[in-house]
Amino acid sequence: MQAQLTENLKNIIAGIVNVESNDTNNENANMSAMTPAGQMMKFASEVSKIYALENLISPRFKDAHEKGLIHIHDLDFYSSKTTTCLQYDLEDMFEKGFYTKHGYIREAQSISTYATLATIIFQTNQNEQHGGQAIPAFDFYMAKGVLKSFRKHLKKRILSFIKIKNEIEITKEQKENTYNFLKANVSSINCSENEIKLMENFFEIKKDDLIKLLTEAYEDTENETYQAMEGFLHNLNTMHSRGGNQVVFSSINYGTDTSEEGRMVIRELLKATSNGLGKHETPIFPIQIFKVKEGLNYSENDYNLARSDFDGILETVKKQKISYENNSENKKNIFETPNFDLLLLSCETSSRRLFPNFVFLDSEFNKHEKWKMDDPKKYKYEIATMGCRTRVFENINGEKGSLGRGNLSFTSINFPRIAILTRKKVEKEILEMEKAGKFLNEKEKNNKKIKLLTEEFQKKVLETTYLAGEQLYERYNFQKTALAKQFPFMRSNNLWKGLGVKDGNEEVGEAINSGSLSIGFVGGANAMYALFDVEHGTSEVAYKVLYDTIEKMGVIADEFRDKYHLNYSILATPAESLAGRFLRIDRNEFGIIKNVTDRDYYVNSFHIDVKKEISLFDKIRKEAPFHKLTRGGHITYVELDGEARKNIGVMLKIVKVMKDTGIGYGSINHPVDRCRDCGTEAIIYDKCPICGSHNISRIRRITGYLTGDLDSWNSAKQAEEQDRVKHGVK
């Protein structure tokens, strides 16, 4: 056995050394494994996996993993005891400063600094976890930076005016007095009439002149905010946080801050995203998620108004500006909800860049009983998600919410494998029963077969769910022995809530128990084919069996939650390399089975088969019920059959249907092709329609996030992308 292990490792390392194109080197689409640092990462990764399996994981869990019954995710990081991901509460870090390895970073004083520090936080913390990082309320956190910049620009404009008009030099005392006055009396970039009056009197400036200065300061702030957001995007797509040119798996959630400052951040972010990177390339990170909320950025009346003249309404939205001359005009809004305009702009941006995705706060399982519209910190009670789909909200060890928490680890179950073994067993039983003359007719035989298939499949799935739950508990007991000093950035800034009070040599157990342990699954559609020769998008029987199975898994997750007092949940696994790993193991053992092992991948979680001809609205309606069952994370996406930017109204309609059907988190896929030679952006088939070049970049969504190009995907996901059927609007 040891010799075989050594030989396998030798072959894997040889493939890395020789820069072979294989699924080991393409396991992570965000990593360039052929670079020197990337090779070092892969060497360490492959050796670490073997060490964990041989020394840290119980034999029954190791055996289940190696046979492909379960998959222990991020096995290479197992021995480090690190957690998967984290959603930051950035308020204290921006307003009070934060610690890094080499010193203290004081309070940020402008939107430019806020945006820069956000990227630094992302990059630094990426090295203390193995998964992604998210900002749950990007607009709320950035808003104060906009206000600080506005005061700074207004101070400069006012003092310059006074200097020129009065032909005097501005003293240091005048500068300090101006700063202190504006800090004390200007609470928004949308200055009230009372604030304008106070400035008139204090600075002895006529109102007409002051209005001009305010307008200029607003435009200065708008320009700075755009540049800050542009820099934010460029940094997160270029700052390599790990070997292999890996940039941070970063996500930002936004859409519910109704302050003018927060709204400006999102308007300029969307504008910068739509414009793209240096040569108008689509930004891959951060994954952007717009939080849709009834009464705040959506209403039926607003939707109907937008649909009545979508292009005209959108143009009106783009031209809206604050007017200080008649401040009461600022209170007027063509929509009844304050942020519906941002939803429209998000749909437009998503039609060009695939982001933002959409999370729905009104879905039954995403609501928080403490959320109130007039709460200035309502974001504390809003669901936020990691862009890949990981969801952390319910909490048995503290208050419900997403801030300062993340996923501890997750393990996935191979549904198709269980289904294949189930069918083999049941068909043998049915044959024996048939020989014994136990069936009166074919219908009775078929009904009995369905009953046995269902019972046996669910029995085996639930047994494996218990297995996965115990394996996660074993891993947690290992993780909790980590010392707080192993996570210096999270600890010194209390990023993972509760870690900040720990002494460096204390174990982290009581702090990280707010995180989630998720039991995932892969290949729901393939499993139904294996059982019934149809999948759940077509068959009511298959649909009910799959739904009931996952519902029963949730009952077991609740049992584990109560037994170990930990946040167990069911996850709709975002299988990237796993979609191929499970398939290859099963095909080697069971051969080619139609719609099961006859392709190079298994379909993700509960998704309708990607090859299934189905309208996008039917797909949404069929997948929506599964979201409430998979509270560890989920996503539903549809594939548009045309160029999205030419019909943005359809994007809005899809968002509405997702909201109305109870989708928790959704996205809209469409081709984003770009000629690298002339920059043409369109649906490009074989060659560029403008210059004839074959040098085409093709951006697609791989799970919940994007990749730089299809070429970086592993073979399984490339095969899946080729099979994805476009969903018509019916």
Image (cartoon, helix red, strand yellow):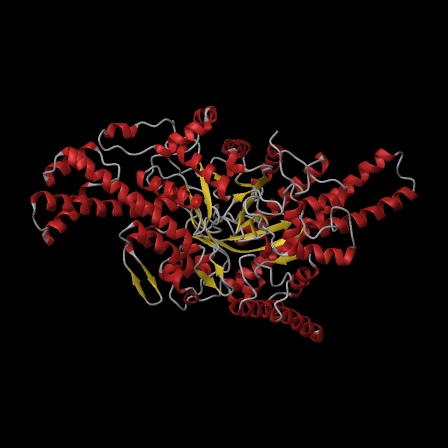
Q: Quadrant of residue 434?
A: top right
> Total of numbered circles in the picture?
0
Q: Is residue 69 left or right of residue 646?
A: right
Which of the image's four quarters has the N terminus?
bottom right
Q: Is residue 612 left or right of residue 658?
A: right
Please name the residue shown 47% across and 66% down the image.
482
Which of the image's four quarters has the C terminus?
top right
Taking depth in this image into account, of 584 and 154 the one nearest to the observer is 154
Image coordinates of residue 292 in percent, x first then y, are 45, 36
Image coordinates of residue 55 in percent, x first then y, are 60, 70
Please name the residue shown 40% across and 36% down the image.
342
Taking depth in this image into account, of 134 and 542 the one nearest to the observer is 134
Q: Return the residue found at the far front.
A: 691
Taking depth in this image into account, of 158 and 696 the one nearest to the observer is 696
Image coordinates of residue 234 in percent, x first then y, are 41, 54
Please name the residue shown 58% across and 38% down the image.
640
Taking depth in this image into account, of 231 and 510 the one nearest to the observer is 231
The answer to whether any part of residue 271 appears in the image is yes
The answer to whether any part of residue 466 appears in the image is no
Q: Is residue 351 left or right of residue 599?
A: left
Image coordinates of residue 556 in percent, x first then y, are 61, 48
Q: Return the residue found at the far bottom.
A: 3
Q: Quadrant of residue 492?
A: bottom left
